[in-house]
Image (spheres, rainbow, N blue to C red):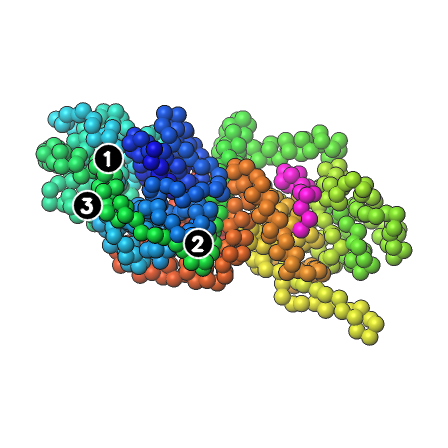
């Protein structure tokens, strides 16, 4: 049985690249091939379709993006410049002869562009494109391999569908995930003319487009892949969507539209609702005549079965050239792949969390039964907060005092660290409500240990760590058992500004939606001069975004480096519990890991202070950071794929800057951005615009809150 590996970045929604991958897997399975599919993200609803396909054919999707793959395939079909890390490494170890098709599905979507053009030239036997326009645009990146047009062909079920030509326009399908306003307005006018318009797509309920579904309509308004479905079924197509479009496909415009993959971007023509109605009604008869006459040609041209035959018959695939990557190419590709994988998975994870949060909030609003949307939202928020407090009281047996702060100090291993901890607490303008001192080796403690009455009226509780326990297990017990509102862990290696606690409480009370606040810090060392111990402060602060009103800690910043070291991070106790407290197994990265998980419970503010309010005295900072990165990446790899989503960005940054020079990666991305900006007709939709488009699809309440957060972070 021949074997094929198909790679694609994501398999989730019913959208272009996911559908292409599914249909390709189905076609090869129907030919008797075993199909392996590799992806960075595998979730429903597409996961359900693939599982159904696997139940009746030899198809397998690797749900873990770090699964081990070999090179023993009869064909490797690459999309989104993606290969499993194990294959990339093996291509650097030895020559391989597996034939490779490198497929590009868009000229403007960044992930579809040749981000590693020189590697693609080295590995691809054939490069394929969905349209002539796509080939022209992407070859400018430096592609030079033999190429072929693979024009979004339709599966056998569409080609073989038994349909008859429509005689009148009575039912019109608009297949779109983003229909423009003028199309919806036109639908109302068409109804008055006796034409029923049905919108199919995400805004109106995403369903699978099948021959049976399309057979119930007389014509289709759409762009992209659905055009080929309709053409092979003999249905007239009106090309129009959010890019605009040329309208009814007709002989004089067909090839121009085909070259642009029926995207609407050949002219990007936008017209009014009235003009749309006129063109749809007046041009229908000619459109039916054209598609009926050309249906045999369309079936031959856009048949997936015939298109795959044409690819497999290529001489370059029958006699593939040997392939091998240099060590540098392996490192660069692994680094870029890790960056893209982590960013995509993390963004998807955050989008899901945001959607879940909004669903829970709307459910609370409905339960509250308020009369107005604004009042209902306010009451729901109060209800949720009250429920959280009730749950905490059930666990602890008593309620937290508003504004109360609990300092948990881990007794340091030397006199200097214990002295810093005591001085930090005693000089605070706002005293801690409770100090818990966590001690180890109580039987051999040096005499310099401060006595309990040395803390000048601050309530103190001492916890001696049992030999069988870890220090952080005792820290977690103190957080869980003492119901204060705020918690901060002082590890003995930090020194606080006298207004540290005052600023922390003021900040969190002024920003009730933030779950914690982190302070800027400088590095400090102790030096001995003439037998006198002095502090020598390094003015370079810990790398972190500047503080200010509305500024919150960025997820990718926290993934790239520990922005929440002990002694700098004051957190709401409820958020600490929500995050699962500290991981006592971690020896080097527990505070980093804790900050990352708290950040997924809510935004962490960055204190706006005139100078760093914390000085960190660290031992072997470089070695410590290296060990922390390795430890945190190791934790991620030990998790199952769904839980690993939380740590994807950490693994990404670890891979990028561990396997390649960071400046080189950023330089490559910068050069790519410059090339894209210089493209004359097809400016890319950049990340910022994608975020704005995403925000535009959110409910108004969530959109306003996220918008304020984004503006503040900028």
Q: Which residue is mark 2?
A: 92
Quarter of the image for residue 626 reads bottom right
Q: Which residue is mark 1?
A: 305
Q: Nearer the viewer, mark 3 or mark 2?
A: 2
User: Picture coordinates of residue 609 (x, y %)?
Assistant: 64, 60
Q: CA distance from mark 2 to mark 1?
A: 34 Å
Q: Is residue 475 above or below residue 538?
A: above
Q: Is residue 308 visible?
A: yes
Q: The residue tagged with tag 1: helix, strand or loop?
A: helix
Quarter of the image for residue 11 reads top left
Q: CA distance from mark 1 to mark 3?
A: 23 Å
| Residue furthest to the bottom | 530
In the picture, the quarter occupied by the N terminus is: top left
Disc tally is 3
Does the segment drawn in magenta span residue 464? no
User: Of callouts 3 and 2, which one flags the residue occurring earlier in the amino acid sequence?
Assistant: 2
Q: Nearer the viewer, residue 547 or 123?
A: 123
Q: Which residue is mark 3?
A: 257
> Which region shows up in magenta?
573-588
Q: Residue at x 23, y 42 (%)?
A: 313
Q: CA distance from mark 3 to mark 2?
A: 42 Å
Q: Is residue 106 left or right of residue 51?
A: left
Quarter of the image for residue 667 reads bottom left
């Amino acid at each position: 049985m021949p074997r094929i590996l198909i790679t694609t970045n994501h398999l989730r929604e019913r959208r272009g690249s996911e559908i292409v991958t599914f249909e390709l897997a189905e076609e090869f399975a129907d030919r008797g091939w075993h199909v392996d599919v590799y992806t960075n993200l595998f979730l429903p609803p597409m996961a359900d379709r693939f599982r159904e396909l696997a139940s009746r054919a030899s198809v397998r999707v690797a749900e873990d993006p770090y699964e081990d793959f070999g090179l023993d395939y009869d064909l490797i079909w690459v999309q989104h410049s993606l290969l499993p890390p194990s294959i990339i490494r093996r291509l650097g170890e030895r020559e391989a002869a597996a034939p490779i098709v490198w497929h590009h599905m868009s000229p403007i979507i960044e992930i579809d562009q040749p981000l590693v053009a020189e590697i693609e030239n080295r590995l691809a036997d054939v490069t394929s494109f969905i349209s002539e326009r796509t080939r022209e645009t992407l070859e400018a990146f430096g592609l030079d391999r033999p190429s072929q047009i693979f024009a979004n062909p339709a599966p056998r079920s569409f080609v073989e569908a038994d349909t008859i030509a429509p005689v009148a326009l009575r039912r019109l399908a608009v297949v779109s995930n983003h229909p423009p306003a003028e199309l919806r307005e036109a639908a109302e006018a068409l109804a008055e003319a006796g034409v029923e318009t049905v919108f199919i797509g995400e805004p109106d309920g995403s369903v699978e487009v099948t021959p049976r579904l399309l057979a119930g309509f007389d014509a289709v308004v759409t762009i992209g892949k659905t055009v080929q479905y309709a053409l092979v079924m003999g249905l007239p197509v009106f090309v129009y969507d959010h890019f605009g479009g040329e309208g009814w496909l007709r002989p004089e415009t067909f090839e121009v539209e085909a070259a642009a993959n029926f995207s609407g971007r050949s002219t990007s023509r936008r017209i009014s609702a009235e003009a749309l109605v006129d063109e749809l009604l007046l041009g229908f008869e000619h459109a039916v005549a054209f598609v009926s006459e050309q249906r045999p040609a369309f079936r031959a041209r856009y048949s997936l079965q015939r298109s795959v035959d044409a690819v497999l018959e290529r001489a370059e695939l029958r006699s593939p050239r040997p392939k091998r990557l240099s060590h540098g190419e392996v490192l660069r590709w692994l680094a870029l792949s890790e960056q893209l994988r982590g960013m995509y998975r993390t963004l998807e994870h955050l989008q899901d969390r945001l959607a879940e949060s909004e669903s829970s909030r709307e459910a609370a609003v409905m339960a509250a039964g308020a009369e107005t949307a604004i009042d209902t939202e306010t009451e729901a928020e109060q209800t949720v907060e009250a429920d959280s407090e009730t749950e905490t009281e059930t666990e602890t047996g008593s309620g937290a005092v508003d504004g109360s702060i609990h300092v948990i100090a881990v007794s340091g291993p030397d006199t200097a660290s214990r002295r810093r901890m005591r001085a930090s607490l005693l000089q605070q303008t706002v005293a801690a409500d409770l100090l818990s001192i966590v001690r180890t080796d109580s039987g051999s403690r040096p005499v310099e240990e401060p006595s309990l009455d040395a803390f000048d009226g601050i309530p103190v509780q001492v916890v001696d760590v049992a030999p069988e326990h870890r220090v952080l297990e005792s820290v977690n017990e103190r957080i869980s058992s003492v119901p204060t509102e705020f918690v901060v862990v002082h590890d003995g290696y930090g020194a606080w500004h006298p207004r540290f606690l005052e600023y922390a409480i003021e900040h969190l009370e002024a920003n009730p939606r933030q779950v914690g606040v982190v302070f800027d810090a400088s590095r400090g060392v102790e030096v001995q001069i003439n037998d006198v111990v002095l502090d020598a402060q390094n003015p370079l602060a810990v790398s972190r975004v500047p503080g200010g009103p509305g500024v919150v800690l960025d997820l990718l910043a926290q993934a790239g480096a520990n922005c929440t070291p002990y002694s700098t991070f004051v957190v709401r106790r409820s958020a600490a519990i929500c995050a699962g407290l500290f991981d006592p197994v971690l020896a080097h990265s527990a505070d980093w890991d804790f900050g990352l998980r708290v950040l997924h419970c809510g935004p962490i503010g960055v204190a706006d202070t005139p100078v760093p309010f914390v000085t960190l005295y660290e031992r072997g900072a470089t070695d410590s950071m290296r060990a922390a990165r390795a430890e945190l990446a190791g934790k991620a790899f030990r998790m199952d794929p769904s839980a690993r989503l939380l740590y994807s960005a950490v693994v990404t940054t670890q891979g990028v800057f561990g396997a390649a020079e960071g400046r080189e990666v950023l330089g490559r991305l910068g050069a790519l951005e410059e090339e894209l900006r210089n493209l004359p007709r097809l400016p890319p939709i950049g990340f910022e615009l994608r975020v704005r488009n995403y925000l535009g699809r959110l409910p108004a309440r969530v959109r306003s809150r996220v918008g304020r957060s984004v503006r503040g972070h900028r």
